[in-house]
Amino acid sequence: MRLSAADYRHPGETPTLVAACWLAITLLAAAEGLLVWLIVARPGLPWVSGTLGMVLLIGFNVGGLIGALQIRTHKADLIGSARRVGPSRLPRVHQAAEDVARRLALPGTPPVYVLPLENLDSFVIAWDTPAVFVTEGLAEQLDDLELRAALAHELAHLKGGDARLMTLIYLPLRARLLPPVLLGPQAVGWLALRWWMAVAELSADRAAAVAVRGLEPVAHWLSAEIEDPEEPGLDLHRYLGYLDREQWRLVGEELRRAYPRVGARILELARFVQSRRFARCLAIVGDLHIQPLEAPDPSSPGVLPYVAMGMLSGLWLAPLTVALTVAVGAPPSPAPATVEAPPATRETEQQPAEQTEPPDEAGAPNPFASGQSAVSLATEADFTEQGMLDVARMHKERGELDKARRALEDLLQQDPTIAEAHYLMAWTCVDMGDHERAAQEFQATVNLTDPDSEMHQEASDALERMEP
């Protein structure tokens, strides 16, 4: 059984990574959208705002791309000024890297380089072939276990897969590959991802503790990197025992006050070392003499990453929800293209015959003469069968015979069995002087109506009057 990154990974790393990446994408999209809006909308002085937006958009994207491309050049420069360790060159560092890589079950040991610098620092560049860099000061001042802890921390970033993202986002800013104002995408990404990077550091600390079988070398390495020359280094021997809750509270307050940069990390790691999960990791790598502890992993993912994901989901889904609501709730477009005034719904189920008779050419009453005004007919948009009949009546009463005829033709094209439409078309054709079409429409009315109905009788009488 081989040790995997999931065995020691902090529970909050994965949800925090999802939330942080989502936040980074949101911020990048907002920045790009703001610059595009500045170009398109051109607020204020159009020429100035448009030019400024174009310059910023090009600089934002080109600067980020150049910053990413400069990583390879920066890595080559570091390798050119460093010494690569090997069995015969800096064998102590080489042996420490080999032992850590084997203990953490890496597929191989990446190249390790020592930079000629006196400060204590170590980092990894995961670009093309990954490489680990340590300074001469770190290699000389740390003992064997502390050196292994530092190397194990960096190799854990490679094993966990987070080193490449850290290299892409953080390295251009840290190494100042370009002026920071030109590294817009990296700055936005760092703003969003530093939350996740802090949790990823805790996972790498856990791996380092597994590699050196305990907390003290890791804590001494962390404290050595920030040690104040006027203050003594951290002595954690008294912190390694089993402390009760009150003692842990006092220890935590002291560490955070004296060493705010590493105090929280050391406390988090100390609780992990006393958990059952740490004992299981040691058992996997071969330390079977370790007695399994009963305490579970004291860390938890927390609710903050899930709250952030929920808020970001709402932010992304809100425009889509509004668009779908508007699309689904929009009223259908009117069917007849020739209608200019909105139609009205039928006010009564059937108009009385004596109120709906316009006079024909012989002076006979017209059953479609209505006492309603055009305004009352257009109070509601209802393109049903009766609504279209009401529109045709409205146009006929106004003397707009062409519009009335077109509306009736649209209605009859949809349903040629509507007797009232044929009847109104017949009277419209009479008023227009098209007696041949009027006779056809009166005949259709006769064929479609009951012989006892008033409409049937009126259509029959009109046909008789129209015969030569």
Image: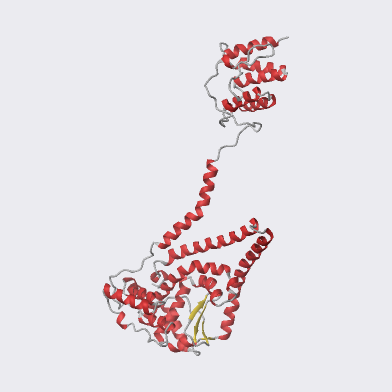
Mark yes or no: residue 68 visible.
no
Q: In the figure, 102 relative to 457: above or below? A: below
Find residue 464 and report its horizontal and vertical position in percent. 67, 9
Query: In the visual, does 307 lie left or right of 377?
Result: left
Mark yes or no: residue 135 visible.
yes
Find residue 442 and report its horizontal and vertical position in percent. 65, 16
Query: In the visual, does 446 lie left or right of 313?
Result: right
Q: In the figure, 26 relative to 450: above or below? A: below
Name the one closer to the observer, 322 or 93.
Answer: 322
Name the one closer to the observer, 251 or 284.
Answer: 251
Residue visible at 34% across and 71% down?
Answer: 277
Residue visible at 69% across and 20% down?
Answer: 429
Residue visible at 71% across and 20% down?
Answer: 432
Find residue 340 and report its horizontal and vertical position in percent. 65, 32
Q: How is the image coloured?
A: secondary structure
Query: In the visual, does 47 lie left or right of 448?
Result: right
